[in-house]
Amino acid sequence: MLSVHRLAHNTAAYLVSRLPADTRKPEVEVVAFGLEVAMGASLQLLVFVVVAWYLDLLPEMMAALITMATYRLLAGGVHCSAYYRCLILSLLTLIIQANLARWLAGAIGGSLPAVGLLVFVAGLVIAWRRAPADIAAAPVINPVRRARLKRACYLWLLVWLAVISLGYYQGWPGSVLTSSLLALVIQSLALTPLGFAAVGWADGLLKRLLPLG
């Protein structure tokens, strides 16, 4: 089984060892962490794009991915306990969202701006109560940083609403806009106790079905 963590650590150790002896060498773990994040994100993106293209869901899945990933950077959210489980769960979520968005786009129709406003308001309330979401591996301890992230979430939501509204009046595909709506709903729920419980249940189920670590 491919281990991104092990690959990143081995690569970091090699890179640090190749630095000149008279230079101040960084800690291997620090370099490994950065490499692991970059490798993991790159691999996930590659898998998402290939699967989306194969299933002919590229616009919808990419709209959902951009929405979820950019908001998650500010708001945080629950994680799976292993990289491969995160990859599988994220991929399944994107596929379901994209297919559901194609069906819902026709049902929502001209009500999309109103639905977008409702999603925005709900997201704003959740961000006010829960963002940024703490996880054991990376708690937000600094109150100043917490306040800045919360304000950044508010700003992101405003920009998102503006983009969705502009896209609607510019005639962007309804399925793409609806996919972004669903992505924000899911990412907002990921900040709540319900979201943490749901991902924890899915993580445990995947661990039993695929006990790979």
Image (cartoon, rainbow, N blue to C red):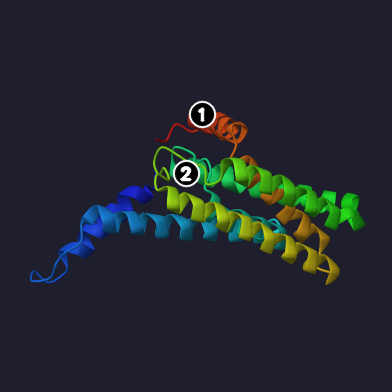
Check disc 2: other Cα within 10 Å, few if <14, some if 14-19, many if 20+.
many
Residue 80 located left or right of residue 11: right
Q: Residue furthest left?
A: 22
Q: What residue type is labelled 1?
A: Gly
Residue at figure coordinates x 44%, y 37% from the top left: 81
Answer with the quarter of the image where residue 160 lies: bottom right
| Front-lying residue, 29 or 48 | 29
Q: Where is residue 110? Give x, y as percent.
A: 91, 58
Residue at figure coordinates x 67%, y 49% from the top left: 124
Check disc 1: other Cα within 10 Å, few if <14, some if 14-19, many if 20+.
some
Q: Where is residue 7? Give x, y as percent.
A: 32, 53
Q: Residue 4 carries which label?
A: none
Which residue, given by chain and number where applicable, does mark 1 sit on?
204
Report helix, strand or loop for mark 2.
helix
Q: Where is residue 27? Give x, y as percent.
A: 20, 57
Residue 54 located left or right of residue 100: left
Which of the two discs, 1 and 2, sits closer to the camera? 1
Answer with the quarter of the image where residue 164 lies: bottom right
Q: Which amino acid does label 2 sit on?
A: Tyr
Q: As displayed, is residue 138 above or below residue 201?
A: below
Residue 92 visible in the shown view:
no
Q: Which of marks 1 and 2 is nearer the N terminus?
A: 2
Q: In which quarter of the image is the N terminus?
A: top left
Residue 33 located left or right of residue 189: left
Which residue, given by chain and number where applicable, does mark 2 sit on?
84
| Front-lying residue, 128 or 81 | 128
Report helix, strand or loop for mark 1.
helix
Labelled pair 1, 2 in contact (Cβ < 8 Å): no
3D distance between C-alphas at marks 1 and 2? 13 Å
Q: Quadrant of the C terminus?
A: top left
Residue 161 visible in the shown view:
yes
Q: Where is residue 167? Give x, y as percent.
A: 78, 67
